[in-house]
Amino acid sequence: MSLVVVGSVAYDGIETPHGRADRILGGACTYISLVASYFTKVRIVAIVGEDFAKEDEDLLTGRGIDLEGLERVPGKSFFWQGVYSADMNDRTTLRTDLNVFADFQPKLPASYKNEPYLMLGNIQPALQQSVRAQMTAPRLTGGDTMNYWLKPEYRDELLATIREWDFLLINDSEARMLSGEYNLKRAAAKIFEMGPQTLVIKRGEYGAILFRRDGYFMVPGYLLEEVFDPTGAGDCFAGGFVGYLAERGFDLKDGLDLKNGRADHKELSRAVIYGSVMGSFCCEKFGVDRFRTLRRQEIDARFHEFRDFTGF
Amino acid sequence: MSLVVVGSVAYDGIETPHGRADRILGGACTYISLVASYFTKVRIVAIVGEDFAKEDEDLLTGRGIDLEGLERVPGKSFFWQGVYSADMNDRTTLRTDLNVFADFQPKLPASYKNEPYLMLGNIQPALQQSVRAQMTAPRLTGGDTMNYWLKPEYRDELLATIREWDFLLINDSEARMLSGEYNLKRAAAKIFEMGPQTLVIKRGEYGAILFRRDGYFMVPGYLLEEVFDPTGAGDCFAGGFVGYLAERGFDLKDGLDLKNGRADHKELSRAVIYGSVMGSFCCEKFGVDRFRTLRRQEIDARFHEFRDFTGF
């Protein structure tokens, strides 16, 4: 019962008010996988160039992540460079080199195809669709996307892709673009018509909202005293959300918690909390550094902290 | 055991994307009092001109609000006019006519002076201080302020005023201005040094945070499908917060819930929820209109709704 994760494994150049790093491990697939590995077995599908460092590979395998689906080809790995504003609520992309990612055609190893959980990190929708098509019958499929793929020229491709998803994870401005509705309740109603019956809207420092047709769940963002680097926080949210559901054997289609043999929609709310917990840890250090030392015990302690500061 | 409320009773001209009103009842004291009247007996201290309409007076007295401290003088009542942006997150003040408010010197009726609860709505800090000084020994004193009084020329006056308060209710940008700290946890730590040991930071559509030295409580904002007019929402939050504490006989100084004879800090969290509930109702109609029909039963139902969509 593993989770298959697709997306970018990349190198990032990051500058925040707290410091800079010229070239560190990054990419949506990397963040999602590292985080989900605290909850479940993870198998990744991605592509890297010859520059992919042994120490970065070791970080992933050290967390038990299966790299059979990590393609290595001649050339350089995807590179992204960005700089954050003083309050870190905005960032500017300085450089995006697709490199080996330009010709990525994800091919799933045979051993991956029967896995029940699939998380499609932000890449071109057609590639997400191709990965979904290679899976036999995933019990739970969901993914992320970004404003770039919401442009008119990609809209049909995106709509055809998310139609098959059980859940969609996007931020508030993307939910507004996708639905054409400013109000988030109305936006959710429109998005349900597009396929996904579970929608998680990420609101950055303000938390997240999970929408289902039968109700919604809201959580405020964790208050950090210091945000060092928000890069990857949204992907870590995704990794915590889907990782926890996979750990619990949750089946979103049937609304069943397979471990207990009964439906428990509160599991989705708890998954949102674990997503929030992992997003908050992500911001405490540069890049993926927090996940070099983080222990599951700290994760569960912060989950209980959420209960304390939101309960009344 | 009544709540004394001080602030402006005014007329507003409001334009939102949903409509406009040229001259409707408004003012911080009005909103706070109407809302708090669902929880406790309210007695107001304010000033109006000869133009104060009988029907507006009737709305207040109809909710059992004591107007003994409402001064009526020759001239016109305070008038404010503003227009909201398309997403209603910003508003521009078009006109502020102080009128009779310019010479307001609040004088408390003798019958008010021994009341245990005091809520100081946003007015000049010196006036808030003068009202506090006329009270014999309030058990719970708190108030609101705004960016205008955070300017250097009023800073000392404001600091001398809030030093005596048990709680301070402000929005996030004001907390940042007052403390000089961007991070809200750090801002709270600085503000505790200024006097108030309970700080409620209002975050508009994103909810609120209650800070105490021993911890904090967070709540997301209620999701409305339609925000007609956000005017007064912050004051309604204040009215729900302090109104509920007064109803419960809560004593913040000693940390005692007098009804139960023991400390229950969760009461403060519940007060934040009632504040959020009342702020959300306020936005559903223009001006104070929602409070012409709102029943306590609806308030409690929404309180329980908060439990449902935040519990996990």
Image (cartoon, coloured by chain):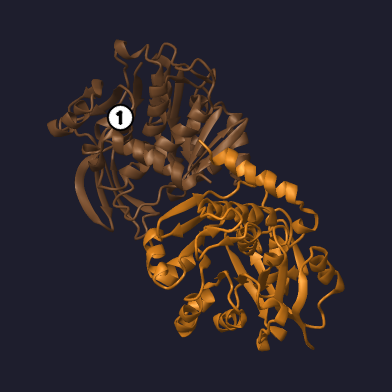
Chain colours: A orange, B brown
Mark 1 closeness class: few <14, some 14–19, many ≥20 residues within 10 Å: many
Badge count: 1
Q: Which residue is labeled 1 in the image?
A: B38
In the picture shown, does residue B54 fall above or below A60? above
Q: Residue drawn 39% across and 26% down?
A: B119
Location of residue A134 in the rendering, given as x and y in whole percent from the top left corner? 61, 82
Quadrant where the N terminus of chain A lies?
bottom right
Q: Report the residue at 54% width, 72% height from top.
A: A146
Toward which corner of the image does residue B215 lie, by quadrant?
A: top right
Q: Nearer the viewer, residue A24 or A69?
A: A69
Please identify the residue farthest to the left as the structure is shown: B54
Q: Is residue B289 above or below residue A263?
A: above
Q: Is residue B123 left or right of residue A69?
A: left
Q: Please report the residue visible at 29 percent of the width from the left and 52 percent of the height from the top.
A: B228
Using the image as rendered, state which of residue A257 and residue A290 is in the foreground: A257
Q: Label 1 sits on what residue type?
A: Tyr
Question: Where residue B199 sits: x, y (%)?
Answer: 52, 33
> At x 69% / y 76%, what residue is drawn?
A112
